[in-house]
Amino acid sequence: MATYTPAEAAELSGFSLDTLRYYEREGILPPVARTAGGHRSFTEADLGTLGFLKCLRETGMPIEKLRRYGELCRDDGTLPDRVALLEEHATAVRAELEALLAQQAKLDDKLAWYRGELAARQAAAISS
């Protein structure tokens, strides 16, 4: 089984070493295995967990909800709670995406107007 040093895990996950330590300390990330020398040793499963945590973080999940998710993941009897937490987050992400798409449409409309104005002015300059 492949294992990774904290530096390798940080590089592969896109998190800083400080964030990895913080996530483990706060219970967001389950405790990471240690080598005989006491150094943290990340597994593929840990990297998978980090990948999903990165997804949650990049989609705006607050730290307190990440912490709650981490707590829930340590108890096999909490599947319904995990589903509810992730459904709530997915709803928030969808709403944010819809708002961004509406803003993008406004931006596209304004760009189209400016491009039309620019084309009209260029055509007027050529005909003068």
Image (cartoon, helix red, strand yellow):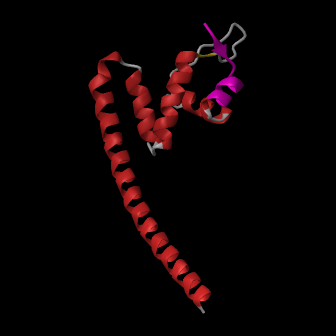
Give me the residue at 52% from left, 23% from top. 48
Quadrant containing the N terminus in the rendered view? top right
- Part of the protein shown in magenta: 1-12
Q: Nearer the viewer, residue 97 or 6?
A: 97
Q: Is residue 28 visible?
A: no
| Image quarter of residue 24 | top right
Residue 19, image x, y percentages: 61, 35
| Image quarter of residue 10 | top right
Residue 3, image x, y percentages: 64, 13
Residue 83 falls left or right of residue 70: left
Magenta stretch contains residue 11? yes
Give me the residue at 64% from left, 25% from top. 9
On screen, 127 above or below 40? Answer: below
Magenta stretch contains residue 95? no
Residue 99, image x, y percentages: 37, 58
On screen, 49 above or below 62? Answer: above
Quadrant containing the C terminus in the rendered view? bottom right
Give me the residue at 69% from left, 7% from top. 36
Q: Nearer the viewer, residue 64 or 52?
A: 52
Give me the residue at 59% from left, 13% from top. 33
Residue 60, image x, y percentages: 45, 46
On screen, 61 above or below 111? Answer: above
Residue occupying the far front of the picture: 127
Residue 104 falls left or right of residue 17: left
